[in-house]
Image (spheres, grey):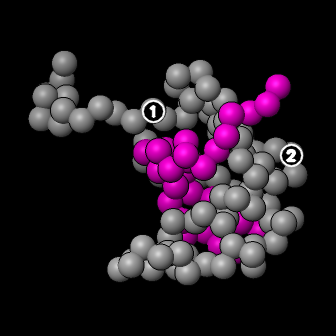
Amino acid sequence: MSFWDRIKPATRPVSATEAALSPDGTRLDLTWEDGVKTAAPAQHLRQQCPCAGCVDEWTNKRTLDPSRVPTDIRITQVQPVGNYALTFVFSDGHGTGIYPWQLLRELTQPRQG
């Protein structure tokens, strides 16, 4: 047990070991440390963006109207944020959301097949 484990006794959340976009950028596939494979459409991830432009910082109320996100939106870039999150650039130019692993686990569903 390391020094940091002793002073931060919280359990470490599961993180993804692999993130891959579908060839057309419309789906994100994740493989997790526990072996679970999940996926989410780009539209769903954009609709659930946690950034201050999409969620009011004071009330935590979503300000982005999900119905205004096009069904054909794509993810054009995926970047890690430290060891705790991913950030995406979407085809509508939006790219300020930081998606922690825990949020991604909640937003993605087990992949079929």
Q: Position of residue 35 (x, y in %)?
A: 59, 21
The amino acid pointed to by label 1 is Val
The amino acid pointed to by label 2 is Pro
What secondary structure is marked by label 1? loop
**CB atoms at circles 1 and 2 under 8 Å apart?**
no
Identify the residue at image location x=61%, y=78%. Answer: 64
Asked whether residue 58 is drawn in magenta, I would say no
Identify the residue at image location x=61%, y=68%. Answer: 95
The crowd level at tag 1 (other Cα within 10 Å; few <14, some 14-19, many 20+) is few
Q: Position of residue 24 (x, y in %)?
A: 87, 52
Q: Position of residue 85 (x, y in %)?
A: 48, 49
When asked about the image quadrant of residue 37, the answer is: top right
Residue 23 — which label? 2
What secondary structure is marked by label 2? loop
Q: Position of residue 14 (x, y in %)?
A: 45, 32
Identify the residue at image location x=43%, y=42%. Answer: 83
Above-or-below relation of 60 to 81: below
Above-or-below relation of 40 to 98: above
Compare residues 42 and 93 and report the one nearer the observer: 42
Q: Which residue is mark 1?
A: 14
CA gap, disc 1 and disc 2:
26 Å
Asked whether residue 99 is drawn in magenta, I would say yes
Range covered by the magenta-colored residues:
84-113
How many discs appear?
2
Identify the residue at image location x=74%, y=57%. Answer: 42
Is residue 75 in view from this perspective?
no
The quadrant of the image that shows the N terminus is: top left
